[in-house]
Amino acid sequence: MDVEFASLEDKLGQLVSLCQALRGENRQLRQQVLALQQDNQQLQAKVDGARNRVAAILSKLPEDEQ
């Protein structure tokens, strides 16, 4: 009976360790997601700005008369 309790205690210890490790990994992944979302917003703003500049340049070009 003592052997079974010791085995169960070891397994619970492993489970607690794994849970703590997964929580740390989850926290790190959430931070990475947040950083990537911020990068994505910045890149989207740059793309929108470039799109607007190209549209402004195209609107100044004369129409093709054929």
Image (tube, rainbow, N blue to C red):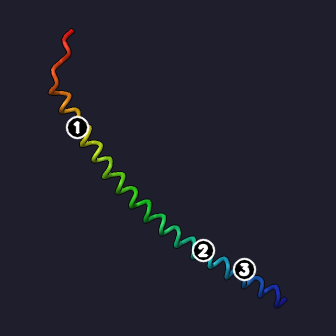
The x, y position of residue 57, in whole percent, is: 18, 31
Q: Nearer the viewer, residue 2 or 62?
A: 62
Q: Element at badge 1?
A: helix
Total number of numbered labels?
3
Q: Are marks 1 and 3 in contact (CB under 8 Å)?
A: no
Q: In the figure, residue 17 lies in which quadrant?
A: bottom right
Q: Nearer the viewer, residue 4 or 47?
A: 47
Q: Which residue is mark 3?
A: 11
The residue drawn where x is 18% and y is 33% is 56
Q: CA distance from mark 1 to mark 3?
A: 60 Å
Q: CA distance from mark 3 to mark 2?
A: 12 Å
Query: In screen coordinates, is 28 left or right of 9?
Result: left
Q: Which residue is mark 2?
A: 19
Q: Quadrant of the N terminus?
A: bottom right
Q: Quadrant of the C terminus?
A: top left
Indicate which disc, 2 or 1, sits on the residue closer to the N terminus. 2
Indicate which disc, 1 or 3, sits on the residue closer to the N terminus. 3
Task: Please state which of the two labelled residues, at mark 2 or mark 1, is closer to the viewer.
Answer: 1
The x, y position of residue 47, in whole percent, is: 30, 43
Type of amino acid under label 3: Lys
Q: Are marks 2 and 1 in contact (CB under 8 Å)?
A: no
The residue drawn where x is 27% and y is 42% is 48
Q: Is residue 29 above or below residue 56?
A: below
Type of amino acid under label 2: Cys
The residue drawn where x is 72% and y is 79% is 11
Q: Which residue is mark 1?
A: 52
Type of amino acid under label 1: Asn
Indicate which disc, 3 or 2, sits on the residue closer to the N terminus. 3
Q: Is residue 46 above or below residue 30?
A: above
Q: Is residue 65 above or below residue 52?
A: above
The x, y position of residue 30, in whole percent, is: 46, 64
Q: CA distance from mark 2 to mark 1?
A: 49 Å
